[in-house]
Image: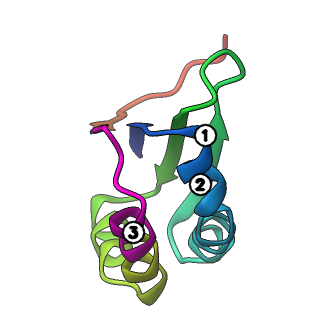
Amino acid sequence: MIVVNAVIESTPDDIAAMKEAVNTMEQASRAEPGCDDYTFSVELNKPGTLRIVEKWQTLEALMEHMGTAHMAEFQKAIGNNPPTSMDLKFYEVKEIQPF
């Protein structure tokens, strides 16, 4: 499994302006083959911080996701509302243990 953890620092107004693009990205990504989860959230105590958590069955599924039309539209929305910083990492998970 591949887990993506992204943190986007922006402003509450810019995040609000991207709400439609975020909704489209979340819903379309969840429908993709190989996607187990795709969730956006805004930090309650830092409303200018947008977090994205993704879970993909394979790296290949994640790479295919990067070429989708909804990814291009989301990147356009990010470009129209540029963040102050972005930190994106992905992790390969070999085994999942119950907590």
Which residue of the protein is positioned furthest toward the front in this rendering?
Answer: 13
Q: Position of residue 90 (x, y in %)?
A: 29, 40
Upstream in sequence: badge 1 or badge 2:
1
Spatial distance from mark 3 to mark 2, Cα to Cα? 22 Å
Q: Which mark is residue 38?
A: 2
Which residue of the protein is positioned furthest toward the bottom in this rendering?
Answer: 69
Query: Is label 2 in a helix, a strand or a loop?
Result: strand
User: Which residue corresponds to mark 1?
Assistant: 12
The residue positioned 54% from the left and 63% from the top of the image is: 35
From the viewer's side, name the closer residue of 55 and 15. Answer: 15
From the viewer's side, name the closer residue of 39 and 8. Answer: 8
Q: Position of residue 95 (x, y in %)?
A: 43, 28
User: The disc labelled 3 sits on which kind of residue?
Assistant: Asn
User: Which residue corresponds to mark 3?
Assistant: 80
Please tell me whether residue 85 is drawn above or below residue 55 in the rendered image: above
The residue positioned 33% from the left and 67% from the top of the image is: 79
The residue positioned 39% from the left and 63% from the top of the image is: 78
Pointer 3 with pointer 2, Cβ within 8 A: no
Q: Closer to the observer: label 1 or label 2? A: 1
Q: Quadrant of residue 47?
A: top right
On the picture, is 40 further left or further right than 91?
right
Please tell me whether residue 26 is drawn above or below residue 5 in the rendered image: below
Q: Position of residue 3 (x, y in %)?
A: 42, 41
Dot 3: within a 10 Å radius of its alpha carbon, few (fewer than 14), some, or many (20 or more) residues? few
